[in-house]
Amino acid sequence: MGDEIAGTTFTRAERTRYREKVRRCLDVFERMLAEDHFETTAGVTGMEIELNLISSTYQPAMANAAVLERIADPAFQTELGRYNIELNAPPTTLAGDSLASLEQSLRESLNRAESLAAGAGSQIVMVGILPTLAREHLTGDWMSENPRYEALEDAVLGARREDIDLDISGLESLRMTVDSIAPESACTSVQLHLQVAPQDFAAHWNAAQLLAGPQLALGANSPFLFGRRLWAETRTELFMQATDTRSPELRNQGVRPTVWFGDRWITSIFDLFEENVRYFPALLPQITDEEPEEVLAAGGAPKLQELRLHNGTVWRWNRPVYDTVGGVPHCRVENRVLPAGPTVVDTVANAAFYYGCLVAMAGDDRPVWSRMSFATAKANFDAGARHGVEASFYWPGYGEVGWDELILRELLPLAQEGLASLGVADDAASKYLEIVKARCQLRRNGAWWQTEAVARLEARGSSRADALTEMTRLYTQGMHSNEPVHTWPLP
């Protein structure tokens, strides 16, 4: 969704031509896979962190244009809501002390951005859903100035042909009808990229799907929405509902949502792009002048922009990515499961755990997905999002098992093994995996800290709104301390 859009409305003829062009791109992509046109270097990683802007009173600050102007760094970009920005870390390998270097560079970038944002009356906070966000914040002039966001909203609402119903039942419940995709802007995440050779993509994607449930139990950080305590990681359900192009009747027919876990293990990256084309109508049917067949025949690397743009509007939790760098095409797995925050060190620890497990599981001679149904992996994902530190999963060899026991006994050793295979220094691997280990032993993550803090403040007589504001103040202090969230004191 980072690609620019020239217009916000599209004719029926343009949609027809776009469908034809996407299918041509898919055919060229299939040829490129068959003829080995891809960069096969693996292990290059990337990270994107979506951030919230808050005022001195810890309310959303609709100031991203002014903040980005002051930051003046292309690593920081706009996001859907005026209170959102995004930080993009440069691609790197994980070998040696690169994890520690990544932590340092992220902290330096965020500290610099924070000091500059202050000049626009804003602070920066990393959290899955901003706890102080209220419905009234998402009315009026809430959307960032970018044609692609307006085009996306028009496309989603045009496909639905009615307003969006939000219905999330958790410890408390939320039901409301909204006339825009504004609630989607509440969902701020960390996206982890890993470049893989095309022939190894399926194993890595299948492994990433298996890890989604444990990732959420370990890293949930979005328990509150519009003042209600819902899921440990409410962001996953909110994102699905806020961008749902289906009417209730289409949902009842089993039509797939655009925010999608998937419904099967794959054997090739082609499976995912082919599913996109087969199942999902275009939301942003913008056509380029590229003739992909001619570019490939001339020995070039076609951009396949129509296929890439279409892929960018199917929000899989683990998304396939086709891209070209320096005229050389490559494939990446983009993991979109984790929320932002709570701290940079927690974020890097989550990344280390994910990359280590992913690489080790993908190289297994008898992979876990050969012994688990896809529906079970989806059930684990839902359990991790709903229950966080109270989640349990089904896992081969264990049956029903608590998330903490599964990670401590099964997944942490795999993460250690995978990081070693990537050349990560022992000291670096140990530092970040020890954070994961402690989080499991104490059964504490960001969602746990937020809910416990609010419960204590309310027990002392604070209203929910006041408790959320004070908790956000304390959360922001903890974030700036860069001490792992499992060590944070409670009020």
Image: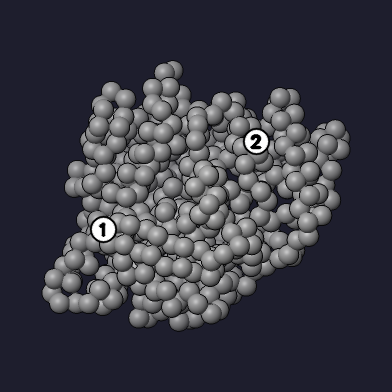
Expressed as whole percent of the image width and height from the top left, the position of residue 332 reads 58, 39
Q: Which quadrant does the N terminus fall into?
A: bottom right
Disc 1 residue type (three-letter): Leu
**Residue at disc 1, secondary structure:** loop
At horizontal 39% and vertical 72% (from top left) the residue drawn is 133
Q: Which quadrant does the C terminus fall into?
A: bottom left
Question: From this viewpoint, is residue 244 visible?
Answer: yes
For the residues labelled 2 and 1, the Cα–Cα distance comes to 39 Å
At horizontal 42% and vertical 53% (from top left) the residue drawn is 236
Expressed as whole percent of the image width and height from the top left, the position of residue 153 reads 60, 64
Query: Counting residues from the N terminus, which is met first, the one under dot 2 or under dot 1?
Result: 1
- The color scheme shown is one colour
Q: Within 10 Å of the Cα at label 1, are there few (<14), some (14-19), or many (20+) other Cα atoms?
A: few
Query: Residue 245: which quarter of the image?
Result: bottom right
Question: From this viewpoint, is residue 204 visible?
Answer: no
Q: Farthest left residue?
A: 460
Expressed as whole percent of the image width and height from the top left, the position of residue 443 reads 21, 47
Residue 150 to residue 431: above or below: below
Expressed as whole percent of the image width and height from the top left, the position of residue 237 reads 42, 54
Q: Nearer the viewer, residue 97 or 481?
A: 481
Which residue was labeled with disc 2?
A: 274
**Residue at disc 2, secondary structure:** helix
Q: Nearer the viewer, residue 71 or 174?
A: 174
At horizontal 49% and vertical 60% (from top left) the residue drawn is 242
Circle 2 or circle 1, nearest the eye? 1
Residue 329 to residue 249: above or below: above
Residue 106 to residue 17: above or below: below
Which residue was labeled with disc 1?
A: 171
Q: How many marks?
A: 2
Q: Within 10 Å of the Cα at label 2, are there few (<14), some (14-19), or many (20+) other Cα atoms?
A: some
